[in-house]
Amino acid sequence: FTTSDPRDSRSTLYCSDVVKMIDAPVLHVNGDDPEAVVLATQMALDFRMEFRKDVVVDIICFRKLGHNEQDTPALTQPLMYRKIAQHPGTRKLYADKLAAQGFDANLG
């Protein structure tokens, strides 16, 4: 089976809400923005080193192919996976962003 609908699998809006019981900060970050993920991770590491307390980075993203290649999530969640099929993917989004900034992908 594919991922359960969050309304069926937990009683809170975010999977990270459980962290509230230890009063740790949670950084929610868009997985389609690699630079934001790096920044959030660096902020979390800096926080951990400075205050010696837990911190959570919640990367908002999805599995394009479900849990594994044998999984067919389009059967159990057709509307969501119809939208996901139209998504260009993080690699393409980031490559387009870099190209728009004048970076040449062929420089290696």
Image (tube, helix red, strand yellow):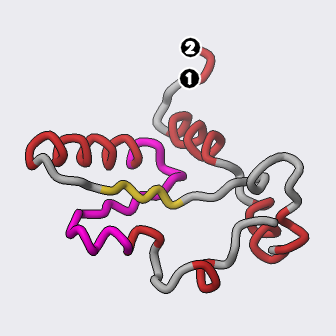
Location of residue 9 with respect to 45 vertically, above or below: below
Residues in magenta?
A: 18-36
Instruction: Please determine whether, in this image, residue 92 is positioned above or below residue 87.
Output: above
Q: Is residue 30 left or right of residue 86?
A: left
What residue sits 23% from the left and 63% below the top? 24
Whether pointer 1 and pointer 2 mark residues with C-beta atoms closer than 8 Å, the reply is yes
| Of residues 22 and 107, the one drawn nearer to the viewer in this rendering | 22
Which residue corresponds to the image point at 56% horizontal and 23% vertical from the top-left?
Answer: 104
Tell me what residue is drawn at x 59 percent, y 36 percent: 95
Q: Mark 1 packing: few (<14 Cα in 10 Å), some, or many (20+)?
A: few
Locate residue 11 relative to residue 35 in the image: left or right: right
Quadrant (top left/top right/bottom left/bottom right) for the C terminus: top right
Give the label on residue 23, or none: none
Which x, y percent locates residue 76? 85, 73
Inspect the magenta stretch and tell me whether residue 24 lies in it: yes
Q: Which mark is residue 107?
A: 2
Residue 93: x and y in percent read 60, 46
Name the residue type under label 1: Asp
Q: Nearer the viewer, residue 75 or 52?
A: 52
C-alpha distance separating marks 1 and 2:
6 Å
To which quarter of the image does residue 82 belong? bottom right
Residue picked out by circle 1: 104
Asked if residue 80 lies left or right of residue 41, the reply is: right
Q: Please state the horizontal and vertical placement of residue 97, each as a whole percent of the image.
A: 52, 42
Q: Is residue 42 left or right of residue 52?
A: right
Q: Nearer the viewer, residue 33 or 43?
A: 43
Element marked by disc 1: loop
Local secondary structure at mark 2: helix
